[in-house]
Image (cartoon, helix red, strand yellow):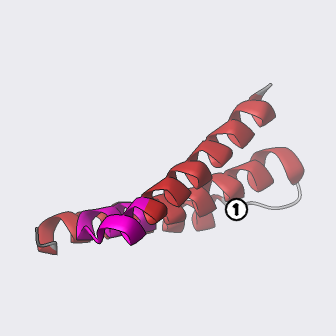
Amino acid sequence: MAGLIYSLCALTSILCCGLLWRSWRQSGARLLFWAALCFACSSVNNVLLVLDRVVFPVEVDLSTWRLVWAVAAVLTLLFGLVWGED
């Protein structure tokens, strides 16, 4: 059951990234660009979570890589919020 929830979270994050990217391409709003990059990093984080917990539960520990991508996602959005122009 946990694997299904992790997979759905990864798919939702990928879908949000795609929708934000498409909206940025249409409107050119810089905040949409930074939000799309944030969700791209979050998508990588969620895919690594699925790999870490479902595919390779014992053999590989991907917690460090997941943490790196989570921090990258937060820092990307923070950078976009602080230095973004309207």
Image point (65%, 47%), residue name: 10
Residue 59, x across and y down, in percent? 89, 59
The region drawn magenta spans: 23-37
Quadrant housing residue 61: bottom right
Residue 70, x across and y down, in percent? 47, 59
Helix, strand or loop status at disc 1: loop
Say whether residue 32 is magenta: yes
Residue pushed farthest front? Answer: 26
Residue 64, x across and y down, in percent? 59, 65
Q: Is residue 51 left or right of residue 76?
A: right
Magenta region, main secondary structure: helix
Residue 39, x across and y down, in percent? 47, 58
Q: Is residue 48 left or right of residue 15?
A: right
Amino acid type, callout 1: Leu
Image point (29%, 72%), residue name: 28
Q: Is residue 73 left or right of residue 6?
A: left
Say whether residue 83 is magenta: no
Q: Give neighbour class at mark 1: few <14, some 14-19, many 20+ (Cα, 10 Å).
A: some
**Relative to 15, is 59 above or below?**
below
Residue hosting label 1:
62
Q: Which of 60/37 is in front? A: 37
Q: Which of 35/2 is in front? A: 35
Image point (41%, 71%), residue name: 25
Q: Is residue 38 left or right of residue 83?
A: right
